[in-house]
Image (tube, rainbow, N blue to C red):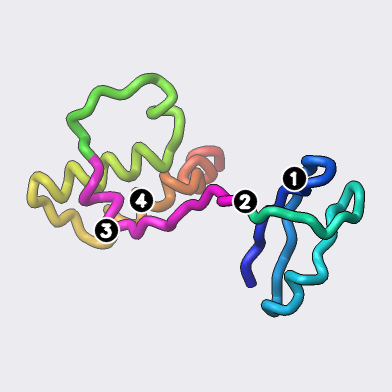
Amino acid sequence: MPIYEYRCKRCNAEFSALIIRSEDESKIRCERCTSTKLTRLLSRFSYHQSEDSRLRDFDPEKPRDDTFYKDSRNIGLWAKKRAKDLGADLGPKFDEVVERARTGKIIDDYEK
């Protein structure tokens, strides 16, 4: 079910619409002026990267600013990449600890 973005040719308003069936597109009207004279816009998009592809593309040697180290997900990614680059198999316990750190759950362990 794609969500399309439109611009009204009459009032220049931009809005999004969910299109369930292709015939639904002909029923769309501008949310501001109800005109049917619309132009479909090219929307931004994103894609999901797998953990393996993130590890493959991650460069642990690249200099980072302070914001990088404030995100626990980055620290976990860095730890996994370094262990992999060193050829160190630290076992499932390592992966578990890294995941707990990345999700912030490890802090709960220390607050008890």
First in sequence: mark 4 or mark 3? Answer: 3
Instruction: Count residues near mark 3 (Cα–Cα under 10 Å), then give few for <14, some for 14-19, many for 20+.
Output: few
Q: CA distance from mark 3 to mark 1?
A: 38 Å
The residue to which callout 3 is attached is 52
The residue to which callout 4 is attached is 97
In the rendering, at what x and y percent does residue 28 appear? 80, 64
The residue to which callout 1 is attached is 14
- The reply, left or right, for residue 72 in relation to residue 54 is right
Q: Would you identify the image quadrant in which residue 76 lies?
A: top left
Residue 56 painted magenta: yes
Q: Residue furthest top?
A: 66
The residue stretch that appears in magenta: 41-58
Q: Secondary structure at mark 1?
A: strand
Instruction: Count residues near mark 4 (Cα–Cα under 10 Å), then give few for <14, some for 14-19, many for 20+.
Output: few
Q: CA distance from mark 4 to mark 1?
A: 46 Å
Instruction: Count residues near mark 2 (Cα–Cα under 10 Å), then give few for <14, some for 14-19, many for 20+.
Output: few
Amino acid type of the residue tagged 2 in the rendering: Leu
